[in-house]
């Protein structure tokens, strides 16, 4: 019913920038919180940044000052602008969203498939 499609991953050199996008599709009435998580091979998935419908944001300490999360409600899309990328940022980045299904009182919680970000010289 609700799906998330991430894009924008790829290979970038240290110090470079990358912009991730995540578009939500389906019968959505309201999206509450959207966020980005990442998982490196052999490591636990961790929160990168989240943004609420009221534009409250929260960032992992490791990305503060470098990453910026934003959302376009008209497009049901969340973005992650990543600057000053470091090799340790290398991971699969997953989009996440929760909200309410259109014309119902049912909620949804969904993950995207993930997009790989590789930071290397």
Image (tube, grey):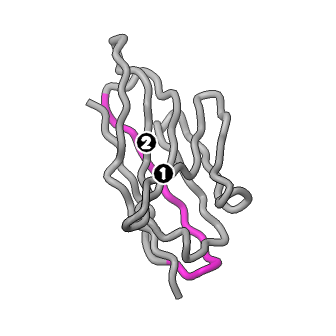
Q: What residue is at 35 percent from the left and 47 percent from the top? A: 112
Q: Position of residue 91 (x, y in %)?
A: 45, 66
- Of 106 and 62, which appears nearest the observer? 62
Q: Is residue 51 left or right of residue 103?
A: right
- For residue 96, above or below residue 61: above
Task: Specify whether residue 19 is painted magenta.
Answer: yes
Classify mark 2: helix, strand or loop.
strand
Q: Secondary structure at mark 1?
A: strand
Classify 68 as above or below 14: above
Residue 63 x %, y %:
65, 59
The image position of residue 65, as x and y in percent, is: 73, 59
Residue with the most extreme right position? 65
* Residue 35 is inside the magenta segment: no
Residue at image coords 49%, 58%: 20
Query: Residue reaching furthest left?
Result: 1
Say which label, 1 or 2, has the lower sequence index.
1
Residue 37 lies left or right of residue 114; in this view the side is right
**For the image shown, how many numbered marks are present on the structure?**
2
Q: CA distance from mark 1 to mark 2?
A: 8 Å
What is the quadrant of the N terminus in the image?
A: top left
Residue under label 2: 96
Residue drawn at x 43%, y 65% is 40
Q: Is residue 96 above or below residue 85?
A: above
Q: Which residues are magenta?
A: 12-26
Residue depicted at 51% across the width and 77% down the height: 119
Measured along the vertical axis of the image, is residue 66 above or below residue 59? below
């Amino acid at each position: 019913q609700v799906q998330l499609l991430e894009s924008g991953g790829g290979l970038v050199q240290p110090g470079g920038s990358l912009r991730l996008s995540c578009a939500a599709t389906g019968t959505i009435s309201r999206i509450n919180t959207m966020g980005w998580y990442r998982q490196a091979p052999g490591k636990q998935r961790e929160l990168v940044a989240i943004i609420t419908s009221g534009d409250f944001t929260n960032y992992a300490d490791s990305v503060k000052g470098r990453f910026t999360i934003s959302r376009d409600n008209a497009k049901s899309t969340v973005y992650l602008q990543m600057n000053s990328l470091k090799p340790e940022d290398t991971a699969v980045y997953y989009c996440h969203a929760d909200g309410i299904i259109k014309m119902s009182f049912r909620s949804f919680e969904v993950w995207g498939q993930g997009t790989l970000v590789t930071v290397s010289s």
